[in-house]
Image: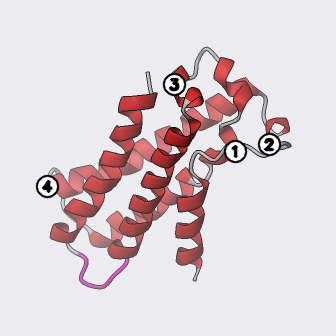
Amino acid sequence: MLKKTLMIAVATSLFATAATAQDQLFKPDDAVKYRQSIYQVMSAQTKVMGAMVKGDIDFDAVALHQRAVNLGNAASLLGETYFPETREVSDSNILPQAWDDMDGFQAKGQNLGTALQELIEVSGQPGFDAAEARPAVAKVMQSCKSCHDDYRQ
C-alpha cells in the first residue's frame, strides 16, 4: 500500500507549480539550492542503476529496486522547489522556456513520474532480472534526458 501511495505521489507531484503559500516555505535562492541537492541525490541513484543495467557493476535486483524507491522519494520533493520567484535565481540551471512552457515542463515531470512508477513496480516483483531492468531503467533515463534537452542549461 505504501509503495502504491509513493508511486501515485511521484507521478502527480513532479514539477507541480507551487501553491500560493509555497513560496513562503523557502526563499528563492534556498529553494534552488535545495532543488539542486535533490537532483544530486537523483543523479547518484540513476548512476548506480545505469551501471547495473550496462553491466559495469554486478546486477542486484534488490539494490536496484531500492535505488528506484530512493529516486522516487527524492523526486517527490521537487514540486515544492518550483515556484515563480525561483525563475530569477542566477544559479538555477532551468532555461527560461521551462517557465514559458510550464505545461510542457510539467508533462515531462509527469513522464518521469510514470516511468519511475513503472520501474518501482516491476523492480519489486519476484524474479526481476537485468533483462527486465534494462528497458525500465532506460525509460527513466530517457525521461530525464528529455527534460534536460529542452529545459536545462
Question: Mark 1 — residue?
Answer: 80
What secondary structure is found at the residue carrying circle 4? Answer: loop
The reply to whether callout 4 and callout 2 are in contact (CB within 8 Å) is no
What secondary structure is found at the residue carrying circle 2? Answer: helix
Of pointers 4 and 2, the one earlier in the residue sequence:
2
Of pointers 1 and 4, the one earlier in the residue sequence:
4
Image-quadrant location for residue 9: bottom right
The reply to whether callout 3 and callout 1 are in contact (CB within 8 Å) is no
Query: For the residue carrying disc 3, how many other residues have a C-alpha within 10 Å: few (<14), some (14-19), or many (20+)?
Result: few
Question: Mark 3 — residue?
Answer: 97
Amino acid on which the number 3 mark rests in the picture: Gln
Q: Residue at x 58, y 37 (%)?
A: 102
The residue mark sitting in front, 4 or 2, is 2
Residue 104 placement (x, y as % from top left):
49, 40
Question: Is residue 128 visible from the viewing direction of this image?
Answer: yes
Amino acid on which the number 1 mark rests in the picture: Glu
Was residue 126 drawn as part of the magenta stretch in this picture?
A: yes
Q: Residue at x 82, y 40 (%)?
A: 25
Q: CA distance from mark 4 to mark 2?
A: 42 Å
Question: Mark 4 — residue?
Answer: 55
